[in-house]
Image (cartoon, rainbow, N blue to C red):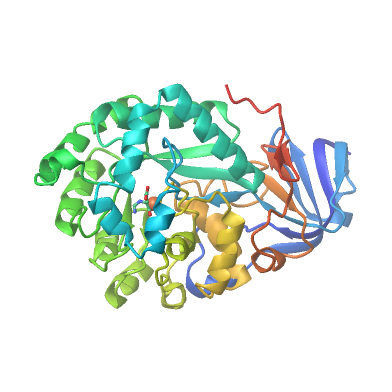
Amino acid sequence: MQSIDLLLTNIGQLLTMEADGPRRGSDMKTLPMIEGAALGIKDGKVIFVGKREEAVHLNAARTIDCKGKLVTPGLVDPHTHLVFGGSREHELALKQQGIPYLEILKRGGGILSTVEATKKASEEELYKKAAFHLDRMLSYGITTIEAKSGYGLEKETELKQLRVVKRLSQNHTMDIVSTFLGAHAIPRSYQHCSDDFLEEMLALLDKISEEELAEFVDIFTETGVFTVGQSRNYLQKAKDKGFDLKIHADEIDPLGSTELAVELEAVSADHLVGASDEGIRKLANSSTIAVLLPGTTFYLGKSTARARKMIESGAAVSLATDFNPGSSPTENLQFIMTLAALHLKMTPEEIWNAVTINAAYAINRGESAGQLAVGRNADVVIWDALNYMYLPYHYGVNHMNTVLKKGEIVAKRGEVCENISLS
Ligand code: NIG
Ligand code: FE
């Protein structure tokens, strides 16, 4: 008999998601699954994956009877703007009047109003607020996220946001990958000299490296924000300093930043609503992962990214919440799965690949998150569902039954356990 810490048994469907790399194109239909399964955990790692009857040699200190439920890897959310001050509910009325997102920004609202609120907030306030959102994400079955800065647009506040992310990644149960998005908008005082502003943001990179505050650098390439030329110059310099790249690419207007992401070998290109045919073709022939954000287009009332064309062309597609106070105020990645089914016409199999392994590869965590294979972290969700098709179908509610992070129970039925350290 082999001694283990925990055995999950009587699993109806176990999605192991095992793969050697991100799933691309038609391979996104592949869904590695074991029915009537068991999962063994020891020292926070997966030690056994297989049929329930093959687990008889395991002597578990504790057993959970999953009662035929669906069990999957913890979800991965590869695009969030986790740390910010305030909120923007007053913009809902502006949206109802038909004032476009970029017009609100132009008037000094939108991202720029969150910048003001984030400047005013103390590091401690931002920490507590972000921890609250992280707890909620965990309660929705998310165990790994990416978090961007970008509500400072000047040295002190950008560093404040990044330090909050670093402290949270040390103290909170969630695994967090940090991205520097200093180039998120042009501050009012730089409206006519945005090149100077980008130089100021680039000047922060040495400090960010030194304090290990971010792995990725991202930029908002958009009409009225940064051009493709500015973005190329900025990201190339960040790459030369050793950062991996992401781009808010073709989110609203089609500018050709999908092509730029491929040219610069960005790890991911995000949004892609306006991606051209050529951009999609290039993406499909590259290692850059498409991170689609159907919650944002839903919330802004925009048309959606062409997910079907991307998948049929052979691209690796992932999904994220884009959690932020303006264009997508939600931590609910399960709802994004429903939007992916209804708006992006993705199949349930494609959706599960998009929120597990492909999401992990989109933030350079393909080797540690997004799949349940022997030797990997036991980041596991037991769902109140009997099959994987149920989640995108039954929408707007939380199907989480139990979340395990590195083998420990950290959330149960919509509640985060009290003993999680939030200090
Ligand atoms: O991904 N487009 C830029 N950034 C965010 C929105 C941020 C905000 O409105 O506060 C996005 O949509
Ligand atoms: Fe975003």
Q: Nearer the viewer, residue 293 or 349?
A: 293
- The answer to whether one can see residue 101 in this image is yes
Residue 121: image location, x then y, percent = 39, 27
Q: Is residue 15 left or right of residue 22?
A: right
Which quadrant holds the N terminus?
top right
Residue 315 picture quarter:
bottom left
Q: Is residue 386 left or right of residue 82?
A: right
Q: Nearer the viewer, residue 169 or 285?
A: 169
- Count of marks overlaid on the render: 0
Residue 278 picture quarter:
bottom left
Q: Which residue corresponds to the image point at 15% horizontal and 38% vertical from the top-left?
A: 189
Q: Nearer the viewer, residue 53 or 390?
A: 390
Q: Which residue corresponds to the image point at 54% horizontal and 71% vertical from the top-left?
A: 27
- The answer to whether one can see residue 19 in this image is no
Residue 194: image location, x then y, percent = 13, 45
Q: Which residue corresponds to the image point at 45% horizontal and 78% vertical from the top-left?
A: 312
Residue 83 picture quarter:
top left
